[in-house]
Image: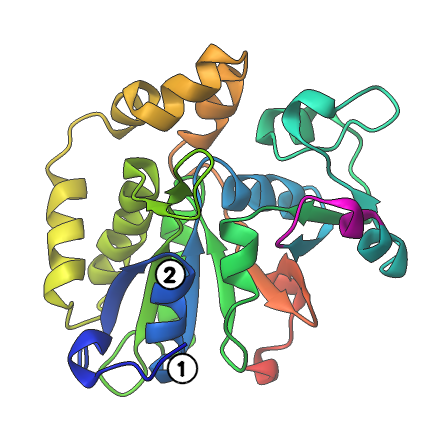
Amino acid sequence: MADIPEWSKQLPWGVRIEWGSAGARALGPDSAALVVVDVLSFTTSVSVAVEAGTRVFPYPWRDETAAAFAASRDARLAVGRQKASAQQPWSLSPAALQRAPAPARLVLPSPNGSAISASVSGVPVIAACLRNASSVARWLVEQGWGSTERPIAVIAAGEHWPGQDVLRPAIEDWFGAAAVISALAEHGAGPLSSEASAAKTCYDATADVAQLITECASGRELAAIGFADDVAVATEIDVSKTVPVLVDGSFVDASAVDAAHW
């Protein structure tokens, strides 16, 4: 990626927000921590799986290489929602993951949230969603992050337009990221960049975030193909205390990681 201009890095703010892999690469290197938000459904699925005790390996491609990667990690492979079966019940569907037996290790391919998780090195990466936004924010502040000296970058994953490698800003990810930012501000993190402040304002002013996401384009897309229960799981706000952090290539619960690791 070409050199990132200084004006685009949202410095010197303590809490910042951007979109997609490009945004992660722009903000990540100057951050103390990077928070990935892919509400429908990568980070929601990560929260469900890690909550059940599964170690989740992100993988950016859903192709023939994913099976080889899973085998190399001695892990089960999640398949596409509509390819799940009794023999292979794990998929990107958080509702299906809640119903399936929890494997010890799971590879979760995703071209959005998973790809972003792997796009920046040398920075702690945390998977956040509406289910755990407050818990993630609290944990981040407890680490001493979220200040001008140790800023946090929150990345809304977004989607891709069908058949195109072009980012489609997805309102569910914007609101998931905004939920984290609102909770960070509540716990004393900041100052917020103008972009982060705008996200917080949108979130705080919305009376029914769950209904908004259910009725947005991505929510209607999942309902139309029979996965409305995924949207229901993804809009369970602050029901989880699990904070998935990326350690040695897989997401695990922060409570299982020695604080000295950071």
Residue 184 lies, in percent from the top left, at 27, 61
Q: Is residue 16 left or right of residue 93?
A: left
Nearer the observer: mark 2 or 1; the answer is: 1
Q: Amino acid at mark 1?
A: Pro
User: What residue is disc 2 on?
Assistant: 138
Q: Quadrant of the C terminus?
A: bottom right
Residue 143: quadrant of the picture: bottom left
Residue extent of the magenta highlight: 60-67
Residue 61 on the magenta segment: yes
Q: Residue 179 at x, y = what percent?
A: 28, 47
Question: Above or below — where is 192 with respect to 75?
Answer: below
Nearer to us in this view, 211 or 139? 211
The residue at 24%/67% (across/down) is: 16
Kindly state the secondary structure of the residue where label 1 is placed: helix
Q: Relative to the observer, which residue lies in front, 42 or 209?
A: 42
Rendering quarter of residue 153 = bottom left
Query: On residue 29, which mark appears?
Result: 1
Q: Amino acid at mark 2?
A: Arg
Give residue 210's position: percent from left, percent from top. Answer: 31, 25
User: Which residue is at the far bottom?
Assistant: 149
- Residue 148 makes an appearance in the image: yes
Check if residue 116 falls in the magenta segment: no
Judged from the image, the secondary structure of the residue bearing numbered disc 2 is helix
User: What is the CA distance from the residue labelled 2 to the residue labelled 1?
Assistant: 22 Å
Q: Residue at x 54, y 11 (%)?
A: 226
